[in-house]
Image: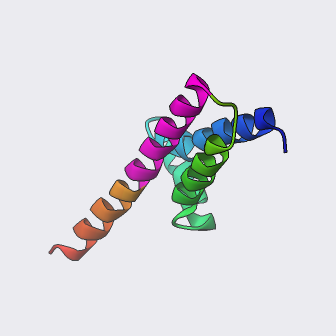
Amino acid sequence: MSKKSLSISSALMFILPVFPLLAGLTRLGNDIFTAVLNIRNFSPLIFGVLGLVAGLFGIKGSKIVSLVVLNLRVAFLTQGLYYFVDWNKLSP
């Protein structure tokens, strides 16, 4: 794959996990978020890690820094949300 296609796939891998989170703010967002989580609970985290790997091998320069930072933020955000939800399920 070319470096340009890797950068584009990294950007798409950033959008895929963020879209259900942002859609949760709308009226229909809960259905979209649950549909993504029904595929696999950790799919947003997997998309974030795949975007991180694709961003590392993509176009060099300031674009690689922005793609890596954005995908790291998404990975940490989704992982933090999962821990928060699991912790709240365990508390009485």
Please say if 15 is above or below 44. above
Residue extending farthest front: 60
**Magenta span covers which residues?**
61-78
x 73%, y 34%: residue: 8
For residue 21, side relative to residue 64 (left or right): left
* Count of numbered marks: 0
Colour mapping used in the image: rainbow
Quadrant for the C terminus in the image: bottom left
Front residue of 52/80: it is 52
Residue 57 in the image: state x and y as whole percent. Answer: 68, 44
Camera-side residue of 85 and 14: 14
Q: Nearer the viewer, residue 68 or 82?
A: 68
Examine the rendering and report whether any part of residue 90 can be seen.
yes
Is residue 72 left or right of 61 when viewed as pictured?
A: left
In x, y percent, where is residue 80?
Answer: 33, 56
Q: Is residue 16 above or below residue 91?
A: above
Residue 71 on image: x %, y %: 52, 43
Quadrant where the N terminus is found in the figure:
top right
Q: Measuring 78% from the left and 32% from the top, which residue is drawn there?
A: 4
Prevailing secondary structure class for the magenta stretch in the rendered image: helix
Quarter assignment of residue 85: bottom left
Residue 27 seen in render: no
Residue occupying the point 24% across, 68% down: 87
Residue sitting farthest toward the top:
62
Residue at 69% across / 31% down in the picture?
A: 59
Magenta segment includes 65: yes
